[in-house]
Image (cartoon, rainbow, N blue to C red):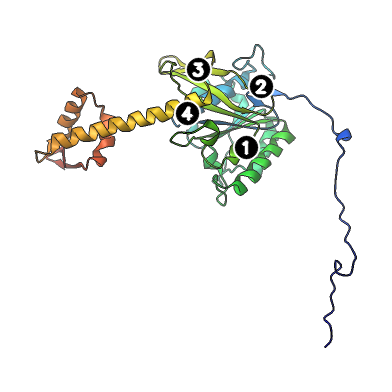
Amino acid sequence: MRKKKNDSKADSGVKTFIDVDMTSAADIESQPISWLWPSFLPIGTVSILFGEGGEGKSFMTIALAAAVSKGLPLPGADVATIPPSDVIIINAENPWPMVIRPRLDMLGADCSRIHRINDGGNRLTLTDERIEAAIRKYNVRLTIIDPIQSHLPSSMSMGRAESVRPMLTHLENVAERTQSSILLVGHVTKGNGKAQHRGLGSIDIINSVPTVMYLGRADGLPRDVRAVAQGKNNLAEMAVAQTFRLNKTDGFQWIGESDVTPDDILGFNAKKSKEAMSKVDEAADFLMDLLSDVDSVAATEVIELADEAGISKRTLLRAKDSAGVTSKRVDGHWIWSL
């Protein structure tokens, strides 16, 4: 029998030479770490801010943008680290004319230095080349992308490490090449657990960046005060938490340092969620007691009686479905029944 010819170079003993591009450590120049916001936002890399919805994440990032545009010191710093600089805000949750521009005006921003990227119907993603092009066009020092999940490529998932790592590596390279600070904004998951496990998506999101912050309320803080606490810092000592006040009367105002930790913030959120569910259960019991012996009750009357019992309209509406309450319009009025 004739032997099959084997053309494999490996089998013939011939090894292919691979030219590997390498750099000696002696040829790499050491550089100090530059900060946009000392200990919070390094220049030339990516940072992440996590928090629950409605707690003021977008407002705070707009306050950062306003300060950078004017060359003002950021909280905890005596002087600004950079002169007045340009900023890009990529925000998928708030409209510019009705929310972002009014907030910038209220915060005294130099709006000529703050930009958005017009996507022309072609949604911006974290790997979009237009982001780096825009940063270079205006020599941008701060780029805010809010929220992460709204800017994922359609083929990628926040829950998979094989999706997260390439995206964040790409952004890290963009930040390093342009010497810009890129701040990603994300939501946290519900429930309990340590801060490092509560960011929405794969744990690799937190593992892939050098600095991570958490924003929210905590026990001991007034109702209208939020804290920004650092949960990870690979470049310096952990920053001291900063607080700000946010209400309709005073708007946005930085207050000062705090000893609040990320676990304090997330623990407060978990407790708040549990208390809210307890109130919903209480409201559901109220509805079943009220409606069990009657055919129906006018919705306005139910709301008034609930208010007298200390149950808010919002909680009552949340409990309506779980209690099996239906509503229908009769003679121009809404009535509720089991």
Disc 1/disc 3 C-alpha distance (Å)? 27 Å
* Relative horizontal placement of residue 204, taking residue 192 as reference (left or right): right
The reply to whether residue 78 is visible in this rendering is yes
Q: Residues within 10 Å of mark 4 (few under 14, many from 20)?
A: many
Residue 278 horizontal/vertical position (percent): 30, 31
Judged from the image, the secondary structure of the residue bearing numbered disc 2 is loop
Picture residue at 89% right of the left edge, 62% below the top:
15
Q: Which mark is residue 266?
A: 4
Q: Which mark is residue 237?
A: 2
Q: Are marks 2 and 4 in contact (CB under 8 Å)?
A: no
Of the two numbered discs 2 and 3 on the same chain, state the one appearing first in sequence.
Answer: 2
* Residue to which mark 1 is pinned: 207
Residue 206 horizontal/vertical position (percent): 59, 36
User: Of circles 2 and 3, which is in front?
Assistant: 2
Disc 1/disc 2 C-alpha distance (Å)? 17 Å
Disc 4/disc 3 C-alpha distance (Å)? 17 Å
Judged from the image, the secondary structure of the residue bearing numbered disc 1 is helix
Say which amino acid is labelled 2.
Glu
Of the two numbered discs 2 and 4 on the same chain, state the one appearing first in sequence.
Answer: 2
Q: Is residue 64 above or below residue 8?
A: above
Of the two numbered discs 1 and 2 on the same chain, state the one appearing first in sequence.
Answer: 1
Residue 133 horizontal/vertical position (percent): 68, 39
Say which amino acid is labelled 1.
Asn
User: Of circles 4 and 3, which is in front?
Assistant: 4
Say which amino acid is labelled 4.
Leu
Say which amino acid is labelled 3.
Phe
Picture residue at 62% right of the left edge, 20% below the top:
239
Of the two numbered discs 1 and 4 on the same chain, state the one appearing first in sequence.
Answer: 1
Q: Are marks 1 and 3 in contact (CB under 8 Å)?
A: no
Quarter of the image with the C terminus in it: top left
* Relative horizontal placement of residue 5, taking residue 311 as reference (left or right): right
* Residue to which mark 3 is pinned: 244
